[in-house]
Amino acid sequence: MALELLLVAFGGMLGGFGRALVSTLVAGLLGERLPWGTFAVNLSGSLALGFLAGGLAGDPGPAPPLALFLATGLLGSYTTVSTFSLQTLFLLRERAFGRALLNVAGSAGLCIAAASLGFVLAGP
């Protein structure tokens, strides 16, 4: 149990660093009129998690240590639905309804598509 918790903690540390790095780089490139950094993190994290899940699809047992490190730790910390929610709320409070809708629909639709693509790419 201790090893599993350490793997999740270490993955979480790396995921948080990756999230800050990718989000900052993308926001610097594309601006912050829309939360592009968060969008890029959630999209790439969904793709990666779908790929991981697709690769593990045949294993219904308990999560192996690598899955705990990657899925729960690294990707759990890397993706950022709470930030997405808050940024959407701020858009709504600014009465930027079109941008808020674009953020929600784009994030949900494309992240589901990315997870699906990752799953298919990793599949048997």
Image (cartoon, rainbow, N blue to C red):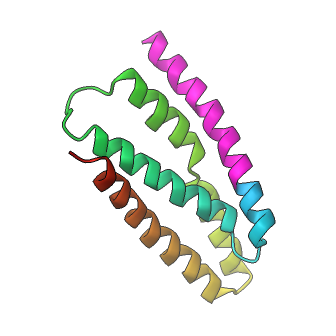
**x, y percent for residue 111:** 45, 63
**x, y percent for residue 8:** 51, 26
Q: Locate the N terminus and report the quarter of the image it occupies.
A: top left
Left or right: 61 as drawn, with respect to 70? left
At horizontal 29% and vertical 55% (from top left) the residue drawn is: 120
Left or right: 94 as drawn, with respect to 74? right
What is the quadrant of residue 47 in the picture?
A: bottom left
Number of disc labels? 0
At horizontal 72% and vertical 62% (from top left) the residue drawn is: 26
Is residue 13 a member of the stretch shown in magenta? yes
* Residue sticking out furthest to the top: 2
Which span of residues is magenta-colored? Answer: 1-22
At horizontal 66% and vertical 47% (from top left) the residue drawn is: 19
**x, y percent for residue 56:** 28, 37
What is the quadrant of residue 52 in the picture?
A: top left
Magenta highlight: main SS: helix
Q: Locate the C terminus and report the quarter of the image it occupies.
A: top left
Q: Residue 95 versus residue 6: which sits nearer the camera? A: 6
Compared with 108, 124 (above or below) is: above
Left or right: 109 as drawn, with respect to 101? left
**x, y percent for residue 123:** 25, 48
Q: Residue 36 versus residue 93: which sits nearer the camera? A: 36
What is the quadrant of residue 68 in the picture?
A: top left
Is residue 4 a member of the stretch shown in magenta? yes
At horizontal 70% and vertical 39% (from top left) the residue drawn is: 17
Compared with 80, 110 (above or below) is: below
Compared with 107, 45 (above or below) is: above
Left or right: 22 as drawn, with respect to 39? right
